[in-house]
């Protein structure tokens, strides 16, 4: 349920205007459901090294795509957000969905994150078209809904990508196989992020346009009682323009990325185990990430520990985070969380991200 995305302005505005017009025009004759979510989070860096060569002080980069960064001053901006989702049932299998999110990391500007139409072909298949979240990771579809997971935010070492939305088409499916449920989707689209916030504001410090073309992928998920297994694969063609100049990789103006992911999650009685293992192959160069989280429920309280890792190879970008926290479900629709994060940045020369840091954050997630 989310997305910052960029197409050519006319195309983007036409898509959003058309969908909003459809929702408003049909509100009198269709059932329109409104739901929402919010996170109010404060945090600060307790101690950190920063990166002297980049003139960067102690920093904890909590949200890579939107550059949600904490420093030594208490801040509410990096993780705080508010979202509203509108869903109109247009009858006979047709529906329209739109979502607006206001994020502190983006100075609380309100943007359309989702905007798509759905048509239910039968009990097993649904086709969709429009703007959606790129379903790379287990928590991609509900990344913004903090109430849906134990942490303050999904571990940043794993959820690092500069592009996380696409505009295109997808087909969702759902089948029962004995005691197993098989679900997932196939999708195709593109993304033109100009300027790309992560690359422009944090890494290159000048206007950077990130283009992903021919994005195609598949997600397969198996669920049975307390066990959930998810497999995913995605491929795309990448172009990048820094300061208006097209970047080249080994003399090539384009490169191909292939993403592979595996998630195994267990929610058994009071015990919670979450894991993700991912690999990105960029023209033969591998980038690996993973996370492991253990939690245990004690009535309405769940303490947890987590470890995540990002490894771009020897001498490249390498960092990992150890986290510990507590989630307290003090209300049927709200949870209080407090989390400590210890980041080790072991990148090679010129490849450090934000340096080592220790930080604390706390807040409330809610749905309505």
Image: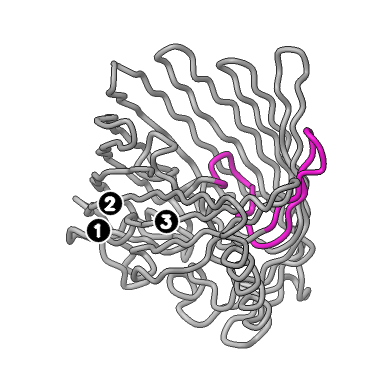
Spatial CA distance of label 1 from label 2 is 7 Å
- The answer to whether mark 1 and mark 2 are in CB contact below 8 A is yes
- Circle 1 SS class: loop
Q: Secondary structure at mark 2?
A: strand
Is 319 positioned to the left or the right of 183 in the image? left
Residue 246: mark: none
- Of marks 2 and 3, the one in the foreground: 3
Q: CA distance from mark 1 to mark 3?
A: 16 Å
Q: Return the residue nearer the eye: 37 or 258.
A: 37
Q: Mark 1 Cα within 10 Å, few/some/many (few <14, many 20+)?
A: many
> Mark 2 to mark 3: distance in Å?
12 Å
Identified at 44% across, 37% down, the residue is: 148
Q: Residue furthest bottom?
A: 244
Where residue 108 appears, as percent x and y from the top left, is 35, 68
Is 138 contained in the magenta span?
yes
- Please say whether residue 164 is visible from this viewpoint: no
Query: Who's the residue at 37% across and 57% down the image?
Result: 82
Q: How many numbered marks are there?
A: 3
Q: Which residue is mark 2?
A: 40
Closer mark to the observer between disc 1 and disc 3: 3
Q: Where does label 3 land, which residue?
A: 83
Residue name at image x 38 percent, y 62 percent: 103
Q: Please rate how many residues cluster around mark 3, counting C-alpha atoms within 10 Å: few if below 14, some from 14 to 19, many from 20.
A: many
Label 2 Cα neighbours within 10 Å, binned few <14 / some 14-19 / many ≥20? some
The image position of residue 365, as x and y in percent, is 32, 43
Residue 69 visible here: yes
- The residue identified by callout 1 is 76
In the rendered view, does 77 fall on the left or right side of 35? left
Decide which of 345, 231 is in the foreground and name it: 231
Looking at the picture, how far across and down is residue 303, in whole percent?
30, 25
Question: What span is colored magenta in the figure?
Answer: 117-141
């Amino acid at each position: 349920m989310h997305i910052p995305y960029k197409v050519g302005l006319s195309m983007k505005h036409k898509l959003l205007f058309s969908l909003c017009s459809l929702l408003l025009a049909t509100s009198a004759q269709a059932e329109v459901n409104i739901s929402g979510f919010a996170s109010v989070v404060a945090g600060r860096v307790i101690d950190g090294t920063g990166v002297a060569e980049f003139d960067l002080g102690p920093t904890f980069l909590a949200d890579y795509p939107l550059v949600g960064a904490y420093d030594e001053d208490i801040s509410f901006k990096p993780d705080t957000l508010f979202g509203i989702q509108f869903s109109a049932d247009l009858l006979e299998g047709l529906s329209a969905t739109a979502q607006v999110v206001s994020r502190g990391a983006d100075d609380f500007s309100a943007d359309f994150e989702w905007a798509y139409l759905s048509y239910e072909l039968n009990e097993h298949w649904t086709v969709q078209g429009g703007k959606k979240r790129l379903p790379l990771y287990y928590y991609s579809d509900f990344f913004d809904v903090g109430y849906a997971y134990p942490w303050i935010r999904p571990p940043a070492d794993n959820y690092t990508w500069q592009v996380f939305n696409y505009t295109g088409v997808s087909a969702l499916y759902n089948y029962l196989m004995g005691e197993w449920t098989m679900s997932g989707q196939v999708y195709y689209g593109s993304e033109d992020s100009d300027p790309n916030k992560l690359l422009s504001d944090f890494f290159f410090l000048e206007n950077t346009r990130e283009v992903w073309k021919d994005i195609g992928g598949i997600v397969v998920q198996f669920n049975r009682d307390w066990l959930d297994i998810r497999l995913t694969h995605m491929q795309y063609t990448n172009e990048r323009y820094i300061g208006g100049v097209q970047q080249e990789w080994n003399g090539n103006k384009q490169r191909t990325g292939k993403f592979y992911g595996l998630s195994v999650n267990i929610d058994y009685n009071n015990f919670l185990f979450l894991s993700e293992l991912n690999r990105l192959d960029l023209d033969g160069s591998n980038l690996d990430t993973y996370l492991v989280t253990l939690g245990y429920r004690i009535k309405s309280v769940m303490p947890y520990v987590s470890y995540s890792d990002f490894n771009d190879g020897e001498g490249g970008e390498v960092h990992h985070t150890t986290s510990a926290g507590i989630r307290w479900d003090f209300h049927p629709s709200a949870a209080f969380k407090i989390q400590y994060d210890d980041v080790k940045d072991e990148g090679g020369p010129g490849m450090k991200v934000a340096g080592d840091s220790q930080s604390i954050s706390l807040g409330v997630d809610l749905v309505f």
